[in-house]
Amino acid sequence: MRGEAQPRPDSPLLVLTGAGVSAESGVPTFRDAAGLWEGRRPEDVASPAAFHRDPLDVWKFYWERREKLLTLSPNPAHRAIAAWQEKFGDFPVVTQNIDGLHQLAGSRNVWELHGSLWIDRCVACGHERRVQTGRETGIPRCSCGAIYRPGVVWFGEALPETVLNNAFEAARNARRVLVIGTSNLVYPAALLPRLALEAGSEVIEFNPEPTPLTPHATRFIQGKAAQTLPTFNPGDGLE
Ligand code: OAD
């Protein structure tokens, strides 16, 4: 959804999400998995070197993740965010997640910092196509003849520049930033709440556990997002 990132510098609200927002949908978070991704070492399945070495092995890993996701649904946290957008306008939902569950819950203006599990990108010409299926019969090929790779950001790769710059700008301009279900350990995403605080914005954090952001946040709302978000009013005091 790279093309979806349109700056909304006037938006008073901004949401930043991480793996925790999808936890109650059944998507495992990263830090909980003892450094492993579905039992694999991240560098073995999520790096340009791994793809270069064995593209089919990497594709199989991503096809499995797609198949699993096809059985999962958005949870009340995703739905609460989509309902806030209905009420307060399409403020940006900046996510580190690649699962597409925000969009499935009805959110618009979702800015995917780490790409999407549902995009194939040609390694040669950069063409992107959206997919909705799980397993494929072989490594997918672009009409230019080269192979596609998963449209996600891998270890050692830069984040999509436009999306990131728009997110920085929106974080500086928002009056209230809601940081939901992220460990705030992975940069540059973890910079967004810091920029907002520096610009004098409120930062409200939602997480069952404190994170490195917690001592700096304006407010920390402790608990699972599927429980804390549905009763929260993000517009309170902003009008
Ligand atoms: P993490 O796995 O690092 O952190 C998940 C956070 O969610 C933790 O702080 C948990 O306490 C919290 N959490 C767990 N259950 C929750 C719930 N039910 N409700 C709310 N919060 C909950 O995930 P991220 O911060 O998203 O990058 O990780 C950032 C990036 O690290 C990922 O996008 C990935 C990884 O390397 C790439 O793949 C490029």
Image (cartoon, grey):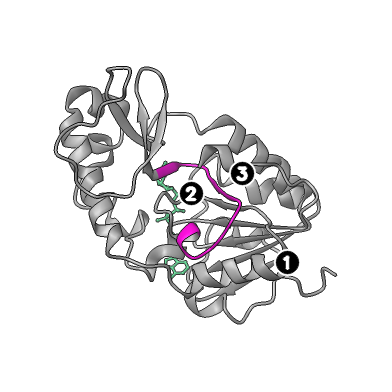
Residue 149 on the magenta segment: no
Left or right relative to 213: residue 57: left
The residue under label 3 is which amino acid type? Leu
- Looking at the image, is mark 2 or mark 1 earlier in the sequence? 1
The answer to which of 147 and 183 lies nearer the viewer is 147
The answer to which of 217 and 156 lies nearer the viewer is 156
Quadrant of the snapshot with the C terminus: bottom right
Q: Is residue 163 visible?
A: yes
Asked if disc 2 is less than 8 Å from ligand 1, the answer is: yes
Q: Which residue is drawn at the image coordinates 64% and 43% (left, top)?
A: 167
Q: Which residue is drawn at the image coordinates 41% and 49% (left, top)?
A: 98
CA gap, disc 2 and disc 1: 22 Å
The residue under label 2 is which amino acid type? Gln
Q: Residue furthest front?
A: 143
Determine the secondary structure under disc 2: loop
Give the extent of the magenta segment.
103-116
Q: Which residue is mark 2?
A: 96
- Looking at the image, is mark 2 or mark 3 earlier in the sequence? 2
Left or right relative to 21: residue 48: left
Q: Is residue 171 above or below residue 88?
A: above
Left or right relative to 48: residue 163: right
Residue 99's spot in the image, x, y percent?
Answer: 39, 53
Determine the secondary structure under disc 1: helix
Determine the secondary structure under disc 3: helix
CA gap, disc 1 and disc 3: 25 Å
Residue 114 on the magenta segment: yes
Residue 189 picture quarter: top right
Q: Which residue is drawn at the image coordinates 19% and 51% (left, top)?
A: 39
Label drawn at residue 191: 3
Q: Which residue is mark 1?
A: 88
